[in-house]
Amino acid sequence: MEIITGVERRRRWRPEEKLRILAEIDGGAKLNEVARRHDVSRGLIWQWREARRRGRLVEETAVFVPVRVIAELPAPEPTEAAAVPSSPPCGERAPEADRPVEIVLPDGTILRVAEGVSLPALRRLVAAVRG
């Protein structure tokens, strides 16, 4: 019999730990044995497997891609339907947050974002494009 005297809390598993446990199973270990050894339920391991299969549980590794810096993008031609904000007068620089950055993904998709875009917002954008 186990007596719990304090507040029992949920265990938090880091993605690396989940993937390490799944790798044991992929390596030929039995699911029941791995679950018992790590004190995790079999159902939770199945959820992790499904998340990995759907791409929601992935190992985050740094990926370097080639970058080409260009002077400036040509200004788009104004149309009557939509007003295009004018570029700053010659000699003036655009505000830091408004300068565009062009990102070309390996599949040829081009993303143009403001230079000051936050990293979490950029991750969400890339995930949505790949989705």
Image (spheres, rainbow, N blue to C red):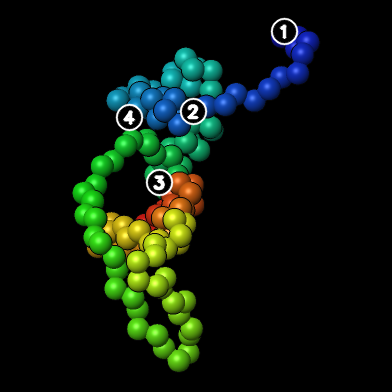
Q: Report crowding for label 2: few under 14, some 14 to 19, many 20 or more residues within 10 A (C-alpha).
A: few
| Disc number lying in front (4 or 2) | 2
Q: CA distance from mark 4 to mark 2?
A: 19 Å
In the rendered image, the residue lying farthest to the front is 91
Q: CA distance from mark 3 to mark 2?
A: 16 Å
In percent of width and height, residue 71 lies at: 25, 62
| Disc number lying in front (3 or 2) | 2
In percent of width and height, residue 85 lies at: 47, 76
Split into 4 quadrants, where in the image is the N terminus? top right
In percent of width and height, residue 96 lies at: 44, 56
Residue under the image location 46 percent in, 53 percent down: 117
Tell me the residue that label 1 is attached to. Answer: 1
Under tag 4, what secondary structure? helix
In the rendered image, the residue lying farthest to the right is 5
What amino acid is labelled 3 in the image?
Gly
| Disc number lying in front (2 or 1) | 2
| Disc number lying in front (4 or 3) | 3
Q: Which mark is residue 26?
A: 4
What amino acid is labelled 4 in the image?
Asp
Looking at marks 3 and 1 on the same chain, the residue that comes earlier in the sequence is marked by 1
Q: Which mark is residue 14?
A: 2
